[in-house]
Amino acid sequence: MTAGESIESGPDVPPVAGADPEALLAQLRTCADLRSDSDAIFLLMTTMWRRSVLTSRRTVLLDGIELTDGATVMDVAPGGGAIARWLLESGHRVIAWCRTKLEADLVAARCDGLTGLDVRVGDLASLRGEQVDLLVHLPVSIEPSPAVSTAEFLALAADVLAPAGSLVWSFANEVGLDTMCAVTDENGGRHRLDLAIPSIEASPWTHRSSRRAAEQALAAAGLAGQRWGACFPTATSPSAVLFDDLYARPEAARVVDQLVGGSIGAPVGSLLLVDPRQAHRRLVAAGLGPQVSPAHVVVASRSGRAEPNAEAAGDGDGAGDGDGVRGGDGHGARLLAALTGAERLRPWQQRLHLMDEDGELVVRRRRVWPSAGVAEQAWVINQVTERAGFVEGANLEVLVADAAERGDLRTVRRELQRWADWLRSHALPTSSDEAATPFRPAGTVDVLPPHLFDVVLSNFVLDADDTLQFIDAEWHIEGGVDLRTVAARALCRFAFQLVVSGRTLPWPATATADEIAQTLGHSVGLAFGGEEIDAWHAAEGELSAMIYGVEAAAARAALDAEGGASRLALAVTQRLPFAALVDEVERATAELGAVRTNYEVTLAAHDAMASQRDTAVERLAAAEAQLADLRYAIEAHERLAESQRSELAAYHDRGAVPAPVADRRRPRPVAPPSYHRMRARIVGPAGGTRHRVLVAARRTLINR
């Protein structure tokens, strides 16, 4: 098969969303610095796909493998050539077998300027006859290209591996936490259980398998010596590898949770059935941890146990020794776990090894790229603690989160008060000589030491004596930090994790992460408000720009969005586990039933009041009609009374002539009628209709 042809056998592996191999190839060909420790390469990792193709974090899968100088390594399906470049820089010879011409071009561009590279495109069988010390297969999807057949791959391994050679193979777990907890098909967008994907027995391809099937296939190929590790969060972009020896320890559930948290490898935006972190803790405690990891890595050899060399996992400078296949000074210990942390600009990158040294758990750290420069910039220092005992115990973040889910606010306050008191006990006297920094503004009253910057709850553990221990002093801020600023930072980060976790919380669903954080801070005497949060966002933006190479404004905007998130926000709701959503629906349904019952009672009361209103309106109309009649009668009688008064005045005028002057022969004047006679004429007889009407009118006038 020629260099321009692709393999025609096997199903196509779809590319990761956002794949742009042609654009990446063009950028690699014009990149001025292609070294593994180059920030120029780091800054090309603008998407998840590019990160998986370009990252050298995948070299953590090779930790503990020891190679002699100038060893020959065969890299099957090398993706973007990150591991091939890393091996070449170590002085080894690399045979890179590519599935397509585009993949071969990417590898050649990534390794430009180095000698010892042999890029091939063709049938796997064409590689037979080679003799290699290490066969590496850590598949990454570059484009829709054929998957590698497990049978062909293992047949090749049996043929090309030297007698003392090793095979390193990583693949996604078809029964991992992501397939059990996630219900989103990341390729088609359909919502279903990924357990419906055919198993390795039906589709034997190397990019996805089950551990049991892979164990049997390796043994059948003569590679009986096997050492297995669990990859988190994925095989293509791992940040942690945990070996079986760690899972066998009695404290495995807590240690594993402390190392990997909820990193299960589910695609961003996946719908989840349950909270993966809680599910993982239970499965590890039940002894099922290795079987349900999101991905596996296996180191296999022809005979004996494939034991990663503890010396090869020791400290080193990362540029030519001490990084797995690069040798090291060694400590005669067993490697239990290797962690590489988040992707950072090269001076800040660290690697952590959890070792078993004569039964004692020990943490060893080292810088991955010391050749990239000093891990110090402006007011930030990245500190490497080369050796420290591993503090095993209950993680404070887990304790508080579990208590919040139970609605146990008393325990939440007690544990947070313990944390707040611990911070106050480490406060230092304020010195005006220290220069102000974003995390220690002018006028700061309570100052913590430089190493107590990252005081998030997950960095605290309760040891066997129930004493709070700070376990990660990696970051130092010159001049110390403002206690309230870093406390606000810790509580806001914790509150956001609570909001998006899907847990039942004792606060309203409308409460934002920042509001919950402020409530928690106020409860333990560390009250802060919007101004302190804004100051932290600004400081964190500057820090992110230095460490991750992002725009400070973009980092601050992301923090603003996190702080404003609530459980009712659509972006948060889409991330909540399905089981949590079901609980929320059931609670909402119960609340809706209560609201409906109350509505029906209120509606009945409303109808009764409406009926009473109609009756009252009718009675009022009748009363108003009666009142109108009374007013009309009163007006008529007032007119009659006025007429009678005029007539009475006329009678008085006629009878006013003096008696002596009167002519006796004239008729005698008629005397005016008495009051009672006049009243009888006007009012009518007592008990008559006119009498009753006028009496009622009189009472009405009096009442006015």
Image (cartoon, rainbow, N blue to C red):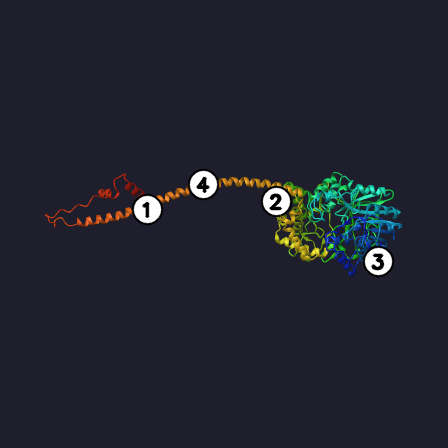
How crowded pointer 4 is (Cα within 10 Å; few <14, some 14-19, many 20+) is rated as few
Judging by the rendered image, the residue that carries numbered circle 4 is 611
Across and down, in percent, residue 62 comes to: 81, 49
Q: Amino acid at mark 2?
A: Trp
Across and down, in percent, residue 63 comes to: 81, 48
In the structure shown, which secondary structural element does the residue marked by tag 3 occupy?
loop
In the structure shown, which secondary structural element does the residue marked by tag 2 occupy?
loop
First in residue order: circle 1 vs circle 3:
3
Q: Amino acid at mark 4?
A: Ser
- Residues tagged 1 and 3 counted as in contact (Cβ below 8 A): no
Q: Which mark is on residue 507? A: 2
First in residue order: circle 4 vs circle 2:
2
Q: Nearer the viewer, mark 3 or mark 4?
A: 4
Across and down, in percent, residue 227 comes to: 82, 43
Across and down, in percent, residue 322 comes to: 82, 51
Query: Is residue 392 among the parts visible in the rendering?
Result: no
Judging by the rendered image, the residue that carries numbered circle 3 is 114
First in residue order: circle 1 vs circle 2:
2
Direction from residue 612 to residue 627 in the image, left or right:
left
In the structure shown, which secondary structural element does the residue marked by tag 1 occupy?
helix
Q: Which mark is on residue 631? A: 1
First in residue order: circle 4 vs circle 1:
4
- Residues tagged 1 and 2 counted as in contact (Cβ below 8 A): no
Cα distance between the residues tagged 4 and 2: 42 Å
Query: Residue at (26%, 43%) from the top-left corner?
Result: 683
